[in-house]
Image: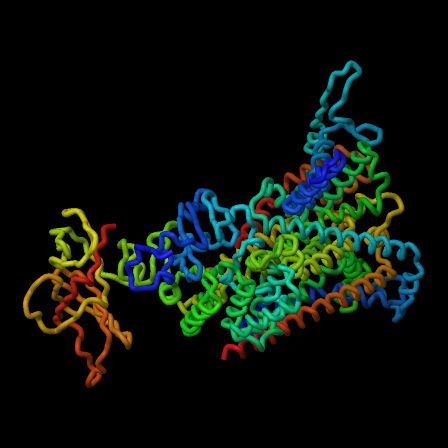
Amino acid sequence: MTVVNHSDERANHFSNALLDVLRRVQSGWRTIVILVPFAWLLIFFLAPFIVIAKISLAEVVIASPPFTRMIEWTDNGIMTIRIVFDNFLYIFDDDLYSRTYVNSLKVSIISTFFCLLIGYPMAYGIIRSGPLAKKMLLFAIILPFWTSFLLRVYAWMGLLADQGTINNILIWLGIIDDPVRMLYTEFAVYIGIIYTYLPFMILPLYANMEKLDQTLNEAAADLGSQPTNTFFKITLPLTVPGIIAGSLLVFIPATGEYIVPDLLGGGNVQMIGRLLYNEFSRNVDWPVASAVAIVLLFLLVLPMAIYQYYQGKAAEQ
Amino acid sequence: MNRNRSRFLSIMLTVGLIFLYVPMILLVIYSFNFSKLVPVWGGWSTRWYSVLFQSEDVWSAVLLSLKIAVINATFATLLGTLAGLAMVRFGRFRLRTLFGSMLVAPLVMPEIITGLSLLVFFISLKQLIGWPTERGFTTITIAHITFSLAYVAVIIQARLTGMDQNLEEAALDLGAKPFKVLTAITLPRLAPGMVAGWLLAFTLSLDDLVIASFVTGPGANTLPILIFSRIRLGLRPDINALATIIILFVAICVAIAALIMFRQQRRQELDEAIAAREMS
Amino acid sequence: MVGQQATGVQDISETPWLDKDADSLVRIKGITKKFGEFTAVNNVDLDIYQGELFCLLGGSGCGKTTLLRMLAGFETPTSGSILIDGIDMSEVPPYERPTNMMFQSYALFPHMTVEKNIAFGLKQDKLPNSEIDDRIDGILKLVELQDYKKRRPQQLSGGQRQRVALARALVKEPKLLLLDEPLAALDKKLRKQTQFELANIQEQVGITFVVVTHDQEEAMTLSSRIAVMDKGEFVQTGTPTEIYEFPDSRFIADFIGSANILDGQIVKDGTDHVRVSTELGEIYIDHGQSIKEGSPVWVAIRPEKIHLSKNAPKKSGPNQAVGMVDDIGYLGNTSIYKIRLADDRIIDVTAPNQIRPKNRTHLITWEDKIYLHWDASSAMLLNK
């Protein structure tokens, strides 16, 4: 038996405590795995939304930051909470905003429809290809996704301009004498959105179709169904989840699109993304810009929830 | 090869692919145009490439973009992998639904909203705690990690779901401690997904214009910001040259990826052949 | 150690469960596992002894796999305890348990060779490399895969993968080897062959096996004892012979093999037999237990225990019936006869085809009038 002096005991105590902590960390690694990305998203994704929601309820002032505080202490220690719905009223009153929202939705819905119209047969065509062709085609669809979005939009500027490739060809062919105005029109915006978002439509459709049992078609044919009938009675209903996923994946970002209307639409096509950006960078009216963003978010919350629901269902399978 | 594909589907595929590729091919061709007016052909030339290479702000923008992209990809892969693991392997935990929603939302959230909210957040944060002192490299990187990690998490979740969970249990059963299971079994199995996630995060970061424009500060121009400020005013032949280089770069990377996948498939087919021989 | 209760002719060391004083290797006490509202395993008690090949048999969702996973440590019991070698396993994580598991999917690490897969567990024990090599060589010899060390799992046939999975679990020399449907992924012919191999290997290494299976033939061939599970509970535990010949409920009689089950009532409880009145008339049954007269009972008769005859018996009596051949299922070695009785009741009878039929026609054919009889020792009396 050795005599343990006080400091030794304390050291012992300390190392035991350390061991305990280490053990807890060992078993707590699970908590860390959850906590780190969760905390990141809470701080840099959720918190910013709360902040703009708050600012959308403030008044604009000429200061830095250019908005009033929601909670203030008056000199005699009374807390005042200032919530102003003026920004939202302003948006709803002003014809410009409501027209822009409606126009954004219109452009977005029509573009989504055309993406589906072009994308569905393409996805179905890929499914019906041989194994090697299938892989090559899939690569061909994914490849543009990896190249710059901005440059793909830029490519159309060259095609659609008054002195652009299309006009040049048409004039050379003698079909037209003077260039047709295409760039900086709504038409250009449609082309741009369909062009850039087409892969987003094709890929979910392909993923959905690939899971389909190909013998279903054979079974239908065996039971006497013509190919067209089989398509409308068997294939189309079973690919509805793919259609929904693809459509939402085009519709949601297209509604808030900024680059395409700015580069291809110029000042002639008002879409909410562009308006928001301008509101923000030129007028520095943060409360109104925040309110515009919140309204856009509300418009898109339902489609986003539907998309998430389908994603969750797909993940379960 | 196409015995099951009707003529209509073949035509749609062809037309669709022409639609996807012709604009980019023209973009490349016009980069070699001598003329200053992009769509007016003035003979072959590489003059716009030399203009491009002499432009100092292009170089500094490329450098900044690459720096952000690499750091973003690395952190996003790390965080996204953790998030994917938490979602697939941990069963139910508190606030799982909220966590799941926050992991999907950045994928579909319009960039304009994400960008605006992050900027306002950074400014409020500066008021509150004095950080970030200036916007630019740091704020762009943080913004990029936030949405990139969601993409990585999707890839990791898909890979984990396809992975036999018994593998991890088998390793535990054979005496490996949880951390060892992670490093010896889970991570090696996840490696291809993590590489894919890294590349995706890298590309997303290089590609982003809207969010970066919001959260950047004076002087910090990423490549997309620079390109955008130039093409807003019209067609620029030097941008065609830059686009050609980027497209070439991406094409080479994708070709390499395709080759790797092709070889993996070959190996798999070979394995199956060997296994089939063992059966008889 | 020698038990007084040993009544059988078997050596007591082969049947430790009959020995009241024998120490069990695994003791499961009142184990319950709930998943939310669903009770997967309900208050189960079990002792498993050293050297046994114990089968948990049951349909899907009966709780057998959950029980196995609790033994391995992948599931935590809601209540109750598991002792292995006298040590409570509640707080012991899977990686510290003296058990190893062979998974139904085999769970071979696809990024490691056969050799690395088998070495994995040994490396976790920090064994010296030379010993690891020796043990890998030894175990590969046992499963006859010496030449496949450098192969990856994807390059092996199903049967070979199964053997690698077995080797990987066995090489750690666990006290208890847990096998989850070990043969389910193999095709039928290979499965039959492997059943015997598995039993042989178990005998050679002397490790206690707990096997989960839904295949009763597999369970009967392999095991020293079987526990039949249903809805999270043990219905009956016993040797294959006990389970088959002495089922203690209609469920078991019907689940294991097939049986003609008749409702009946005790007429008289004699000294060496009971008389039960059933739809088939009065049945005499030799038995050892006494049942109160008048209580409802069931009589089960296995199809192969009934004799068929085209000739009427010399004298009428109990354990006899007459009917008409309604249908015949010809299996080659045996035939199943569906005999329709006067009250339209169908009785199944199986009989071996011992005589090669002349002129390619069988002795017994459709619509034949046929007499059935069975021994008093063949019928089984069930009271639940």
**Nearer-the-camera pick, A115 or C145:** C145
Question: Measured from the top left, where is residue A218 in percent x and y?
Answer: 45, 69
**Nearer-the-camera pick, A285 or B121:** B121
Q: Which residue is rendered at x = 49% and y = 60% of the image? A: C177
Image label count: 0
Q: Is residue A171 above or below residue A283?
A: below
Name of the residue lying farthest toward the top: A76
Q: Is residue A210 above or below residue A248?
A: below
Question: Measured from the top left, where is residue B172 in percent x and y?
Answer: 58, 56
Q: Is residue A232 visible?
A: no
**Nearer-the-camera pick, C315 or A81:** C315
Q: Which residue is rendered at x = 22% and y = 83% of the image? A: C360
Question: Measured from the top left, where is residue A168 in percent x and y?
Answer: 79, 65
Name of the residue lying farthest toward the front: A1
The colour mode here is rainbow
Q: Is residue C183 left or right of residue A14?
A: left
Q: Is residue C325 left or right of residue C77?
A: left
Q: Is residue A46 visible?
A: yes
Q: Is residue B197 left or right of residue B234?
A: left
Q: Is residue A191 above or below residue C167?
A: above
Question: Measured from the top left, where is residue B165 in percent x and y?
Answer: 56, 57
Dividing the picture into quadrants, the one containing residue C121 is bottom right
Quadrant that contains the N terminus of chain A: top right
**Nearer-the-camera pick, C13 or A301:** C13
Name of the residue lying farthest toward the bottom: C359
